[in-house]
Image (spheres, rainbow, N blue to C red):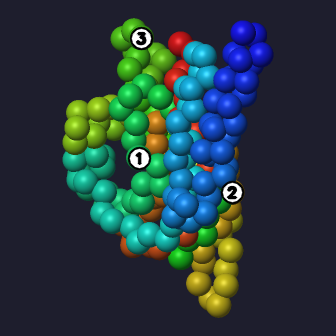
Amino acid sequence: MKNWRITAQSIIIFLAIYTIVGLGSVIPSDVSAATVTNGTISEERYVGQKTEMSNPASPLVTPHGKIPHQIVFALPLRNDSKVWTGTATFTASKPIEIEVLHTYKPQSVIDTEHGEPYHATLPNNMTVAISTMTMFTDTPVKLTGTPISSGSLQFTGSALVFHKTSGEPFTVTYTVDAVARTPNN
């Protein structure tokens, strides 16, 4: 009976690994996703490679609706309390910022002495704190007379966004390898 249980567990583990790794030739090359459950750990993995043109951000989420932001969501905003954690590598046609969005639900009222982190309320009434990373904007690569942004980063948050505050349209090619996990809080 013990050998049967060990064999059954081995088969389940093999099938989970085969699903994630072995079906690469069946899943389209630009996207793969899998959910693996092992006891109390449940993870959703996303691997994607895309080239996208930016779109204007909703004026409802830009400060006072006046800043004409351009955006590309590399990973969609999660509304299930899980967070993405992973790596992204990209190259963009113009210098851009990277934003990681975080669900913003303070545990107590934030006073003026401490201040609030940069945040925005989205059209779906979800409030997010925003980590804006400018390290790729401050040191753009210049090829053929045109500055571009290029880099690789690790991130953890509710969404991953390529962003340009000037409102100037851009194109970005990126590869993302991320896992959605439930936080320990």
Q: Residue at x 55, y 69 (%)?
A: 173
Sequence-first tag of 2 and 1:
1
The residue under the point 72% across, 9% down is: 1
Q: In this rendering, is residue 136 above or below 82?
A: below
Quarter of the image where one finds residue 111: top left
Front disc: 1 or 3: 1
Query: Gap in Å between the C-alphas at discs 3 and 2?
Result: 33 Å
Whole-angstrom CA distance, mark 2 to mark 1, is: 19 Å
Residue identifier under label 3: 107
Closer to the camera in the image, 77 or 149: 77
Q: Residues within 10 Å of mark 2 (few under 14, many from 20)?
A: some
Residue ID for mark 2: 152
Mark 1 residue type: Pro
Is there a contact, CB below 8 Å, between mark 2 and mark 1?
A: no
Nearer mark to the viewer, of 2 and 1: 1
Give, as a three-letter code, the residue at label 3. Answer: Gln
Q: Nearer the viewer, residue 68 or 161?
A: 161
The earlier-in-sequence mark between 1 and 3 is 1
Q: Can you identify the residue that label 1 sits on?
A: 76
Q: Please report the residue visible at 49 percent of the width from the left and 71 percent of the height from the top.
A: 51
Q: Position of residue 60 (x, y in %)?
A: 22, 47
Answer yes or no: do the residues labelled 1 and 3 have beta carbons within 8 Å? no
